[in-house]
Amino acid sequence: MNNPFAQMAAITAMNLSNLRERKTSSLVAVVGIAGVVAILVGVLSMREGFRATLDLSGAKDVAIIMRAGANSEMSSGLGLDQTRLIADAKAVTQKDGKPVASPELYVVVDVPTRAAGTGANVPLRGVGNQAADLRQHFKIIAGRMFTPGKFEVIVGHGAATQFAGLDVGKSVHWGTTDWEVVGEFEDAGGVSESEIWTDATVLQGAYNRGTSYQSVRVKLTSPSAMQALKDELTTNPQLNLRILSEGDYYAEQSRSLSIMVTTVGYTVAILMGLGAIFSALNTMYSAVSARTREIATLRALGFGKFSIIMSVLTEAMILGAGGGVIGCLIAYIGFNGIRASTLNFASFSQVTFAFAVTPMLLLNGLIYALLLALIGGVMPGLHAAKMPIVSGLREL
């Protein structure tokens, strides 16, 4: 048998048939790699879920207009006259003779979470009459829409799920005002589901905001009308604005959290991966040590070093693949679809989202498992190949 690949296949088959004798050490390596993969995929699924929530909210034909220099609605401010000039722009869609525009006000209220009962910052958004038309998937799923001019709110499905006291029919107290929860809405999992809505004019009065707003949302005549809107508004000397599409705005909002979660996820995975590598090293060194006589005999029969090395690496990779698959399954079952909330650092308010274990995350987890196994099998493989034939045969 002079073909090195045929030799490798024969040795690997023999090695795998002997796994039962080394089941404890092999299981330790598999479990170690599975744990690393499950943690890595689980942590990164938080990033993917948060990103997906914001991506769902970014319509191409909707623009968000804020004060120049503002990096979020929280840091913006617009006067009533400015919001009217924005709504009258030629690039804004008209419906029943009125522009599809919503001047909006944004405050944060303290609401206890259902799980821990501790307070969390939840967005209370004052919206205009056209707000629902600017969220393409908006629909009331319980109760009704709030009545303009009254202290009534509707609650996003995500907020109603994560936070206590927001059920339809309940009364809540924020600031100096009692508010009645009259409805619950969905928006295809978008970021607005993390919010509570009320009439903007009512919110202005309740929080002493006069006639000020923080942003204006407008529906464009087409996605390509964004540049025309920017040209018209930025050349108006009465206005000093920052104009973004919803997609660009939410991409900015997600960037800081995505970077943080990615950094934490890979840092933890690398640190845990070191432990998994040592486990794989121990497993493969034990396997080589237990087969000293077999390896020496194979070398004496003409099996090459390359075949010996590759057989050890193949066994390590098979163990790594097993750990990777188990880890991916654990992550998918344990994390995918679980709803949670996290702080949006741009607005310092909570955003609810569902963890998303995507196919790409699972593929990355499996690749990482194979990489750990490969690193853990290299040194034992080289050790086996360099083993003196005479010394090995003396073990007979």
Image (cartoon, grey):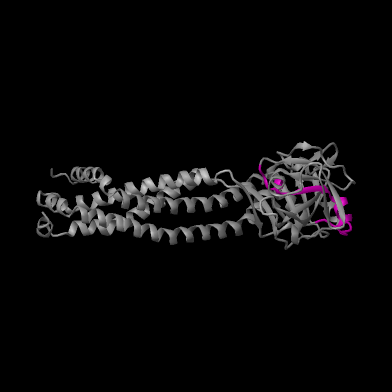
Q: Which span is picked out in magenta?
A: 189-213
Residue toward you, 329 or 194 = 329
Q: Position of residue 205 (x, y in %)?
A: 89, 55
Q: Nearer the viewer, residue 266 or 286?
A: 286
Looking at the image, is 5 positioned above or below residue 256?
above
Query: Residue at position x 40%, y 49% from top?
Result: 367
Q: Position of residue 204 (x, y in %)?
A: 86, 55
Instruction: Name the image quarter holding the N terminus.
Output: top left
Give the residue displayed 66% in from the left and 49% down from the top. Answer: 352
User: Between residues 246 and 208, which one lies in front from this camera angle?
Assistant: 208
Q: Seen in the image, is 245 located left or right of residue 327?
A: right
- Which residue corresponds to the image point at 70% horizontal and 54% vertical from the top-left? 117
Image coords of residue 266 (percent x, y): 48, 58
In the depicted structure, whether residue 252 falls above or below residue 354 = below
Q: Is residue 195 within the magenta segment?
A: yes
> Is 49 inside the magenta-drawn segment?
no
- Please tell me in which quadrant of the rendered image residue 389 appears: bottom left
- Which quadrant of the rendered structure holds the C terminus? bottom left
Q: Is residue 69 left or right of residue 80?
A: left
Query: In screen coordinates, is 277 left or right of 64?
Result: left
